[in-house]
Image (cartoon, rainbow, N blue to C red):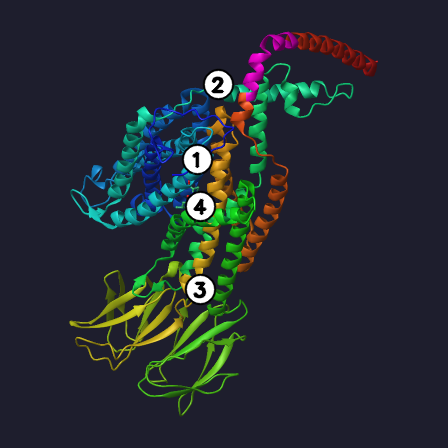
Amino acid sequence: CTDKEDPKKGKEKRGTSKEVCGYPLSIFFIVVNEFCERFSYYGMRAVLVLYFKYFLRWDDDLATSIYHTFVALCYLTPILGAIVADSWLGKFKTIIYLSIVYAIGQVAMAVSAIHDITDTDRDGTPDNMTFHVVLSMVGLFLIALGTGGIKPCVAAFGGDQFSDHQDRQRRTFFSVFYLCINGGSLLSTIITPILRAQDCGIHSQQKCYSLAFGVPAALMLVALVVFIVGSGMYYKAEPQGNIMLDVCKCIGFAIKNRYRHRSNQYPKRQHWMDWAEEKYDKLLIAQIKMVLKVLFLYIPLPMFWTLFDQKGSRWTLQATTMNGYFGSLVIQPDQMQTVNPILILTLVPIMDSVIYPLINKCGLNFTPLKRMTVGMLLAAIAFVCAALVQIEIDKTLPTFPSTSQSQLKLLNMGSETVTIKMPGNDPLNLTAAQASNEYFTFEAGQINISVGHPEVRNTISLAKGQRQTLLIPLTITDEWLMTDDITSKPQEGNNAIRFVNGMKTAVNVSIPAANFGLIEPFSYSNYSLIKNGKVTFTLWSGSQSCEYSTDFGFGSSYTFFIPSTLVFGPNCQESITAAEDIKPNSVHMALQIPQYFFITAGEVMFSVTGLEFSYSQAPSNMKAVLQAGWLFTVAIGNFIVLIVAELAKLPKQWAEYVLFASLLVAVCFIFSIMAYFYTYIDPAEIEAQFKKNVNEDDEDNKHKLQKTEVEMNKRDSIKCHDEDDKDKQTKM
Ligand SMILES: CC(C)C[C@H](N)C(=O)N1CCC[C@H]1C(=O)O
């Protein structure tokens, strides 16, 4: 608990909070509140798309667009919360009121997910979907208002608890604050999907979305209670009137006044805001200048979030083309995202207690803006890593036929070896029930194939741009059958499976999750998508059955062949053969860890620093507003992802990653130039100076002001006459 204080700074204590190791006790309640609130927000968000899809029965497009609109709204509403806090209610009351709105929203979501409410016929599905849709939309709107509205206030309110001399402690607070955000989000994104997977209900058991939303609602209530419990200890800065209105009027006046005095005869002023001096307080003008300077610096920042937010989209899609087996543990593609909060929990303490002090010891002045610049560069490196991983993945992907090509595989359904001759290829021997390992590629639309001895010749038509399998029958003089095979990797790490029945009787194939249906003799089933892991198929022919088990990885496609020689019994493991049409993903998901490491290290340098920077550089009456400005960069970043995803349709995914990395490096270069010209300020000191000057020169100022105003009016009236004359001249 040692503290090197700045002796020049005032040491008056803020609030009535006790101090522990130099930290006000009140911040304990604030960080616990943040932990619970982020648990509530991220927990609810983790199951939201699934709720839209499986409970409200929306299609993928509608579910995704409503989800993104909600997320964007959550980062736009901070502006509203900040204005209310800084201009009207103060941060404390704003947090309380908006937390209540937030908790009501979460409860509305939990209630909207109780299917029994409208399930009058008790069949397990809601009968009045409109009720559930309306209630959940109202709930989401209230949540967006609440979570966004309180977010800038809580961070700024936490910062307010420190006295001016506690810079170091305040910096640590922002790090702990960030740890709580990520601790809460990590826990909830693990817990709520588990809750959702439970079955619950009064009349019928369904997936328990009400519990998955109910627990976040409870956590929001806990957040509110914890915040209220700390009430007596907080330092509560009073709002100083309708500051945002004053700011807008002052900026408007400065612009108008500058325009009115655009002629060269008026002496230039140092800053365009100085043109408001005639009417507005110098302190307010100085405060607006501080805010504008920081907001200007924020212009390039959304680009960082544009890259950061692709963890949830592009990187998760990349993970679906990878192998998620970590020993006996299977990691699903979307679970890789939890690497980010896990790394935050380890990197924040390491940065704060090892890296930054070490850099300081080396005599380098690692200022906040330098940290943010390095953070952006690390994010760009993360995208270069993502591109390298993508190149590795691309190497393992099958080569699908171009639009002018056709690909053909062969499966011998007979019980004897056959020799197959195709144009441009060596003769191919296939033993009983064997399929060719690879697809053969042909440019021609028709090819002649001869099979067996004595040869049976056939001309077969191939479909352009397609993959097909030729099923060679038991008796080769019988009709030859062609199947249409899939020509892309199965989505989301699923496996595409089908069965070919070589028996003389129909066979039914099923697994608990899917039924392949009745497969007629010498025929094949449609593809079914199944998840990774061990699967046991049950085959039925009349009253006879047998079981066949196999393990699946991620993203493969198989054709299972049921031979004519199959003997039904408890086990048909040895008889069924599997043709691997598309290999399972082989590039391991662990290869994504470096890109997660770099983006998270970048986030720690960029976001934790940015949060503290936004607080420390904001005037006392606009702390929440600047926090909202910071969060606005996150919202814009989200929008850019949506736009770029539509526009930048590069043929190769790795090229898109490189494009994003290059864009961020370019933006980072611009930001570093802007940062070079930025001078750090101590708003408290500047404000104190102004107040002191105002008190001393109060009388004097009043006189000067009145005099200036009289002179201004005189000048204006002369100018008006001049302009009238000019007008007259041109008109004449
Ligand atoms: C996406 C993670 C669960 C959380 C992330 N590391 C994070 O802390 N944030 C992303 C946007 C800003 C910040 C937050 O406040 O949630």
| Residue 585 rendering spot, x and y as whole percentages | 40, 66
Q: Which residue is mark 3?
A: 488
Q: Locate the N terminus by quadrant.
A: top left
How far separated are the C-alphas under marks 1 and 3?
A: 53 Å
Task: Say above or below: 684 vs 207.
Answer: above
Answer above or below: position of 715 versus 275: above
Type of amino acid under label 4: Asp
Could you tell me what secondary structure mostly forms the magenta stretch? helix
Return the residue at label 4: 352
Q: Residue furthest bottom?
A: 454
Image point (51%, 51%), residue name: 379
Label 1 or label 4, whichever comes before in sequence order = 1
Q: Name which residue type carries label 1.
A: Arg
In this view, 268 is above or below 52: above
Q: CA distance from mark 3 to mark 4?
A: 47 Å
Residue under label 1:
170
User: Where 658 falls versus 64 (above or below)?
Assistant: below
Q: Is residue 52 visible?
A: no
Residue density around tag 2, few if under 14, some if 14–19, many if 20 or more, within 10 Å: some
Which of these two is toward me, 272 or 499? 272
Q: Quadrant of ligand 1?
A: top left
State the CA–CA distance, disc 3 to disc 2. Answer: 59 Å
* Residue type, mark 2 in image: Asn
Q: Secondary structure at mark 3?
A: loop
The mark that comes first in sequence, 1 or 3, is 1
Q: Which residue is mark 2?
A: 242
**Percent from the top left, x then y, of residue 177?**
39, 39
For marks 3 and 2 on the same chain, the one whose residue lies earlier in the sequence: 2
Per the rendered image, the range of residues in magenta is 689-705
